[in-house]
Amino acid sequence: MFKKILIANRGEIALRVIRTAREMGIKTVAVYSTADRDSLHVRFADEAVCIGPPPSKDSYLNMSRIIAAAEITNADAIHPGYGFLSENAKFSRICQEHNIKFIGALPEQIEAMGDKSTAKSTMIAAGVPVVPGTQGLITDVAEAKKEAKRIGYPVLLKATAGGGGKGMRDVWDEKDFEKAFEEGSQEAAAAFGNPGMYMEKLIQEPRHIEIQIAGDQYGTFCHMSERDCSIQRRHQKLLEETPSPFMTKALRKKMGEAAIKAAASVNYEGVGTVEFLVDKDRNFYFMEMNTRIQVEHTITEEVIDFDLVREQIKIAAGIPISGLNYEPTRHSIQCRINAEDPFHDFRPNPGKITSYHSPGGHGVRIDTHAYAGYVIPPNYDSMIGKLIVSAQTREEALAKMERALGEYVIEGIHTTIPFHLQLMQDKNFRAGIFTTKFLEDFELKKP
Ligand code: MV4
C-alpha cells in the first residue's frame, strides 16, 4: 500500500481524499495556490506545499510544480480529484515516468475516451449501444447531409473534443445544416483547438443516467448502480440522485452490463463512470466515459454503503476487486451548494462567508471546505459544498432534503440553497418526471 499520497486538487474533494487516506493509515500532502493559504485542505493534510499563484495554469494545472512537490515530500502516489489534471493523459504519463502512481486512469485509457468520435467507434466494436450517426468525423459536408437525410432530422452535430456542449448544434432542417456545421466546428476549434465534428440522431427529451463502475488490474469489473443527473443547467449539474426514478431492475442490469463492456473494451483500471442518454422508451445510448472520481460519487457511496475513494486507492495499489455487482438499498440525493446567485442567472458570487451553520441529523452528509470566515477566492469553481441526504425511500429523502436545506445557514454570499428549496416544491420533480430539459422550463420565483 502507498505510504504517502499527494492530492493535486483543492476544496471539498481534497478534503474527501485526505479523510479516506487517514482512515487507511496513509500520510497526505496538500498542494495549494497562494489564494488557498487558509483552505481546510492545507490544514487537514499532514504536509502542505505551495505550488504557485492563484491562476490554475500556474498552480493546480502546473504539472512540473506538482511533480516537484511530490518528489520533495517523497509521495509515492498522486490523487488528482476531479477537474484540473484528473483526465489529463500527459500528466498520467509523467507520473508513470517519475515512478509516482497516478490514482486514476492510465494514459492510454484517458486517450481512448477523450476523443468522443474515437470512443464511439470503440463502443460500437464492443457492442455497446450508441446513438445512430456518422462513423468517424465529418470530412465532407455534402456526404454528411446525405447521411443526415438517411438517419432523419433532427440531428445533432457534436465536437469530437467535446464536453460541456461546446460546439454542439441541433439541426432540424437540411437548409440549416451547413451553417450549423460551420459554426459548431469554429466554436470547437476555438474552445479545444480541434475542429473535428461528428453527427448523431437527436434524442429528444432524454434523461442523463450514468453508471458507476470499477475495474481492477486483473481484468475484473463490477457495476455499482446508477445516478440520474438530468437536473442540469447549461451543462452544469445541480442535483443528482440514485436510484433514478425512471430506472427498472431490468434496465439497471442491462445498463450495468453495457457499462462493464464499455470499460472492459479499454482495459479500464480504477473507478469510472459511463454516461448514457436514455429516451422515453428506455432505449439507452453510450454518451461518454469519465475516467475520474466524480462530484456526485457520494450518493452512490450512500446507497451501496461503500467508500469509492478507498476503492480507487486499493485498485491503484494492485488489490483485486470482488467482481460483485451492487444494487442500491436506499435512496440518496445530492444538492450542489454553489456560491452563485440563482436570482441573477446563477452569477458566481465569491467573497467572505460571514456566518455558517450546517444541517445535521440522521441521513445527512455534508462534504465541504466552507466555514465561517472563509473567503471564497474568485479563481476557481463556484461549488462550495455538497449536501447529501439518504433515506429508505425517495419520498423520505425529498422530505429530509427539504428539511436540511431549511436548516442550512450560509451568510455573506448568495448560494444555490434557495433554488434547491424551490425545486423540492416542484410537482413534476417530486413525481420523478423530468428530463435534461427540465431546468429550461423551470421558473424560479423571486423571494
Ligand atoms: C445528445 C443529446 C441528444 N441527442 N446527443 C450534452 C453534452 C454532451 N456530452 C452530450 N449532450 C447531449 N447529447 C444526442 N444524440 C442531448 C445532449 C444534452 C444533454 C445531455 C445530458 C445532460 C444534459 C444535456 C443538456 C443538453 C443536451
Image (cartoon, rainbow, N blue to C red):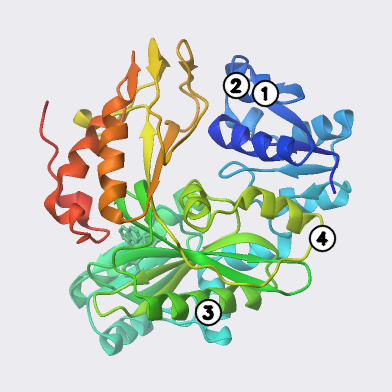
Q: Disc 4 or 2, which lies upstream in sequence?
A: 2
Numbered disc 1: secondary structure: helix
Q: For mark 2, what is the residue?
A: 40
Q: CA distance from mark 4 to mark 2?
A: 30 Å
Q: Quadrant of residue 205?
A: bottom left
Find ligand 1 in the image and state its quadrant: bottom left
**Which image quarter holds the C terminus?**
top left
Numbered disc 4: secondary structure: loop
Q: Quadrant of residue 241?
A: bottom left
Q: For mark 1, what is the residue?
A: 44
Q: CA distance from mark 4 to mark 3?
A: 24 Å
Numbered disc 3: secondary structure: helix
The residue that appears at 86% across and 40% down in the rendered structure is 3
Callout 4 amino acid = Gly
* Image position of 2 (left or right of 310): right
x and y, in percent, of residue 389 in the image: 39, 43
Q: Which mark is residue 257?
A: 3
Callout 2 amino acid = Leu
Numbered disc 2: secondary structure: helix
Callout 1 amino acid = Phe
* Image position of 226 (left or right of 342): right
Q: Which mark is residue 112?
A: none
Q: Disc 4 or 3, which lies upstream in sequence?
A: 3
Residue closest to the eye, 231 or 425: 425
